[in-house]
Image (cartoon, grey):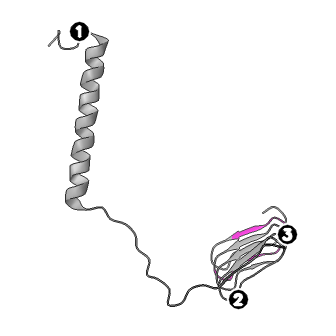
Amino acid sequence: MAGQFSSPERVQECVCRAIRSAAAVALVMMLANGVQAQTVPPPPTAAGCIENTGSASFACGSGSNAAALATAVGEGASASAANASAFGAASAASGSEATALGHSAIANAADT
């Protein structure tokens, strides 16, 4: 046993072989059990998205609106100030550079 690791190269070779063997076993186990992924059902209708390149604004979702230099994504999302971002249904970002994340989230101060 003492002669098995007689040089650093031999140690490295054994470690590499062990890592490759472990990776192969993990791959076989994943393939045998299947890999799970989260699925999301498609919406009944596609969301209406509008991009205004002249004012650099983007709104996506029924009833969403975005001011110049703003982004609003989600049904009823509103980004009403410059550089504001609202993501989520009924979210509202009304402060300059404010970001509202999540359903009914509100960001009304600058840089929040």
Residue kind at label 1, given as amino acid type: Ser
Which residue range is magenta in the image? 89-100
Q: Position of residue 82 (x, y in %)?
A: 85, 69
Q: Position of residue 111 (x, y in %)?
A: 81, 61
Say if mark 2 contacts mark 1, CB within 8 Å: no
Residue kind at label 2, given as amino acid type: Gly
Local crowd size for mark 2, using a 10 Å CA cut-off: few (<14), some (14–19), many (≥20): some
Give the mark nearer the N terminus: 2 vs 1: 1
- Mark 2 lies on a secondary structure that is loop
- Does the magenta-highlighted stretch encompass residue 96? yes
Which residue in the structure is indicated by mark 1? 6
Q: Quadrant of the C terminus?
A: bottom right
Give the mark nearer the N terminus: 1 vs 3: 1
**Secondary structure mostly taken by the magenta-highlighted segment of the chain:** loop
> Which residue sits at x=37%, y=66%?
37
Q: Is residue 98 left or right of residue 1?
A: right
Q: Position of residue 21 (x, y in %)?
A: 22, 37
